Image (tube, rainbow, N blue to C red):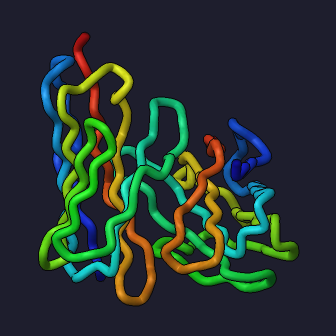
Amino acid sequence: GQQVMQIPQYQHVQEGEDFTTYCNSSTTLSNIQWYKQRPGGHPVFLIQLVKSGEVKKQKRLTFQFGEAKKNSSLHITATQTTDVGTYFCAGYSSASKIIFGSGTRLSIRP
Amino acid sequence: DVKVTQSSRYLVKRTGEKVFLECVQDMDHENMFWYRQDPGLGLRLIYFSYDVKMKEKGDIPEGYSVSREKKERFSLILESASTNQTSMYLCASSRSGATDTQYFGPGTRLTVL
């Protein structure tokens, strides 16, 4: 069946360092969403990418959707302690079925 | 703001008990979802509903059932709880499109002893 793989599972960085998480799908996606879950919280929507090769920015966060619409990435520049949490991608197949990646947990050394 | 509430934050049940997890949303959303979240496995879809009295199986429906008698309420039922159903259960809702943003509830951490 369709799978969405997300790597790395964990990332521990020094505050101020950059961070990137990657999602790869076994099939072409119609769109992809990114969510953030703070420790003890619930997932909160960050952004949606729809077009092939699309790049969107939210302050220090840059989101990319691959040309083949099978992969995506989230890059955070100069991490801050407020970035701590688990980042999930969620891909939609042509059948409009959602599949979440396993998440990347980001921790930060002040 | 969209508000999705779940009946309990923490729940402890015994093996074999029937368990009801309730979810209510206040934004007139058409779609509602139930997920379970386990370390290293992300969010796995159990059941979803695109309309009242309608339900569709997700990726891991075994051992679960759902009920949606009213638009705002979506219930997850464990007919006979087992220890491998110990998990965090998250409810979500979205407006109407199949790929609309999902809004999550706070989650229910269920422990089955």
**Is A22 drawn above or below residue B52 in the view shown?**
above
Q: Residue at x 20, y 18 (%)?
A: A15
Residue drawn 22% across the image and 82% down it: A27
Out of B59 and B74, give the one closest to the viewer: B74
Task: Judge from the rendering whether residue A79 lies leftward or rightward of residue A68; answer left or right.
Answer: right
Asked where in the image residue A1 lies, by quadrant, the reply is bottom left
The image position of residue B90, as x and y in percent, is 59, 53
Q: Is residue A71 above or below residue B14?
A: below
Relative image position of residue B106 (x, y in whole percent): 64, 42
Residue B54, located in which quarter of the rendered image?
bottom right
Residue at 33% x, 44% y is: A58
Rendered image quadrant of residue A30: bottom left
Rendered residue at 55%/61% (across/down): B102
Q: Is residue A31 above or below residue B93?
A: below
- Kindly tell me whether residue B19 is visible in this rendering: no
In this view of the protein, can residue B83 be seen by the observer? Answer: yes
Where in the figure is residue B26, as x and y percent of width and height? 80, 57
Q: Quick one: B32 or A65, which is closer to the camera?
A: A65
Q: Is residue B64 left or right of residue A11?
A: right
Query: Residue B68, percent across and down?
Result: 79, 74
